[in-house]
Image: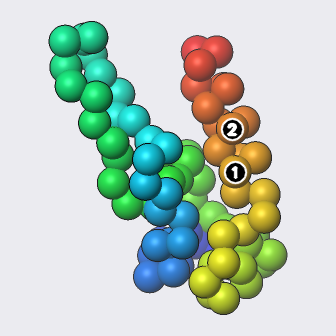
Amino acid sequence: MTALKSLKNHLHVLAQPGITRKERKSKLEPITEASGPVLDETCKQVCATCRKSLREGKRPRISLAIMVVGLVQCLRS
Ligand SMILES: [Zn+2]
């Protein structure tokens, strides 16, 4: 495992305009998009397979699946 912060210059491949929303505290607040790479904020490390993909400028194959699991866990709480 590698520290995620050591790959910060490779995370641009995880940016995906148009799919994120910032949390709103009220429905009166405007809907805004989160900028930058789409990351699970609890993720601090990267496995060797994902590190290789990121260093090659590719999105890791299972990155979307991990995001969906994270979202489901978030929605349950
Ligand atoms: Zn991985």
Which residue lies under the disc numbered 1? Answer: 64
Distance from disc 1 to disc 2, alpha carbons, whole Å, reads 6 Å
Q: Is residue 68 left or right of residue 27?
A: right
Residue drawn at x 78%, y 57% is 62
- Find residue 71 and report its horizontal and vertical position in percent: 61, 32
Q: Is residue 67 left or right of residue 39?
A: right
Q: Is residue 32 left or right of residue 5?
A: left
Which three-letter amino acid code belongs to the residue tagged 2? Val
Label 2: few (<14), some (14–19) or many (≥20) C-alpha neighbours in 10 Å: few
- Find residue 36 and report its horizontal and vertical position in percent: 38, 60
Question: Which element type, helix, strand or loop, lies under badge 1?
Answer: helix
Label 1: few (<14), some (14–19) or many (≥20) C-alpha neighbours in 10 Å: some
Which residue lies under the disc numbered 2? Answer: 68
- Contact? badges 1 and 2 (CB < 8 Å): yes
User: Does 27 sit above or below residue 69?
Assistant: above
Pick the quarter of the image with the N terminus.
bottom right
